[in-house]
C-alpha cells in the first residue's frame, strides 16, 4: 500500500502507470529491471539511514542543550 500512496501523491492514474512500466520495459528489458529496482532500493535505504542518523544527531543536540538550560 505504501507504493500506491506514492503514485497517488503524483496523481497518476492506472493507465499512466501501465504506460510508464511499459516504457521502462522497452528501454531496459525484462532482465535489467530487477537490477535497477534493487539499486534504487539500496539508494533509498541509504538515504533513509543517513537522514535518520542526522535526525538522531540533531535530537541529541537539542536534548543536551535543554539539559544545560534546565541546570543553569
Image (cartoon, helix red, strand yellow):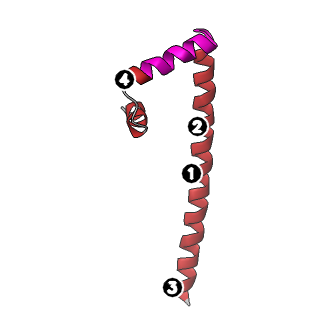
In the displayed orientation, state which residue is furthest to the top: 30
Circle 1 residue:
52
Q: Distance between the Cα atoms at labels 1 and 4? A: 33 Å
Q: Are marks 3 and 1 in contact (CB under 8 Å)?
A: no
In the picture, residue 9 is in which quadrant? Answer: top left
Sequence-wise first label, 2 or 3: 2
Sequence-wise first label, 1 or 2: 2
Magenta span includes 27: yes
Circle 3 residue:
70
Position above or below: 17 against 25: below
Please tell me which residue is depicted at 62% across the width and 40% down the height of the picture: 46
Q: Which residues are magenta?
A: 17-32
Sequence-wise first label, 4 or 3: 4
Query: What is the magenta segment's predominant secondary structure?
Result: helix
Q: Nearer the viewer, mark 3 or mark 1?
A: 1
Please tell me which residue is depicted at 53% across the width and 78% down the height of the picture: 66
Q: Which mark is residue 44?
A: 2
Q: Which mark is residue 14?
A: 4
Q: Residues within 10 Å of mark 1 (few under 14, many from 20)?
A: few
Q: Distance between the Cα atoms at labels 2 and 3? A: 39 Å
Percent of width and height locating residue 57: 61, 61
Q: Distance between the Cα atoms at labels 3 and 1? A: 27 Å
Amino acid at each position: 500500500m505504501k507504493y500506491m500512496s506514492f503514485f497517488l501523491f503524483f496523481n497518476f492514474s492506472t493507465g499512466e502507470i501501465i504506460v510508464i512500466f511499459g516504457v521502462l520495459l522497452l528501454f531496459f528489458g525484462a532482465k535489467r529491471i530487477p537490477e535497477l529496482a534493487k539499486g534504487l532500493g539500496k539508494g533509498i535505504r541509504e538515504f533513509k539511514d543517513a537522514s535518520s542518523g542526522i535526525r538522531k544527531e540533531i535530537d541529541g543536540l537539542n536534548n543536551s542543550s535543554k539539559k544545560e538550560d534546565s541546570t543553569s
